[in-house]
Amino acid sequence: MSPREPSYRTLRLLCANAVGMAGFVLAFAIAREFAVALVAAVVVAAIGYVASSAVVAYASA
């Protein structure tokens, strides 16, 4: 990667954050337990970070 080519790390983190927050709210609404919702949010955010490569590909095109 050249110095002028953007890494889109912030975009990937924003995508992961949005998905993680949505996962937390949904899991908390279903399970009504903070710990369960927190674990679900971390797992879903990790998946969202990996899946954000499609958003990055779109942004870089």
Image (cartoon, rainbow, N blue to C red):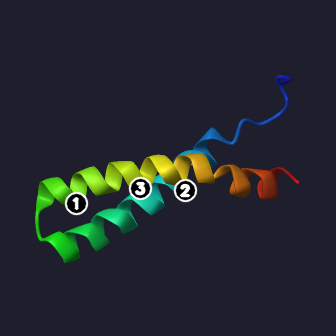
The 10 Å Cα crowd at callout 2, few under 14, some 14 to 19, many 20 or more, is many
Residue type (three-letter) at the residue carrying disc 3:
Val
Q: Position of residue 31 (x, y in %)?
A: 16, 70
Towards the viewer: 61 or 23:
23
Classify mark 1: residues with Cα within 10 Å, few (<14), some (14-19) or many (20+): many
The mark that comes first in sequence, 3 or 2, is 2
The three-letter code of the residue at mark 1 reads Ala
Q: Secondary structure at mark 2?
A: helix
> Pointers 1 and 3 in contact (CB under 8 A)?
no
Q: Quick one: SS at disc 1?
A: helix
* Amino acid type at mark 2: Cys
Taking the spot 46% from the left edge, 61% from the top edge, the residue there is 18
Sequence order check: which comes first, mark 1 or mark 2? 2
Label number found at residue 44: 3
- In the image, 53 versus 15, the foreground residue is 53
On-image quarter of the N terminus:
top right
Q: Which residue is mark 2?
A: 15
- Point out the frontmost of discs 3 and 2: 3
Q: Which residue is mark 1?
A: 37
- Taking 23 as reference, is 50 left or right? right
Left or right: where does residue 21 sit relative to residue 19? left
Disc 1 to disc 2, how far (Cα)?
Answer: 18 Å
Quarter of the image with the C terminus is bottom right
Left or right relative to 30: residue 26: right
Q: Is residue 11 above or below residue 3?
A: below
Rendering coords of residue 33 (x, y %): 11, 63
Spot occupied by residue 4 in the image (x, y as percentages of width and height): 85, 29
- When the figure is inspected, residue 4 is found, relative to residue 41, above or below; the finding is above
x then y, percent, for residue 55: 70, 57
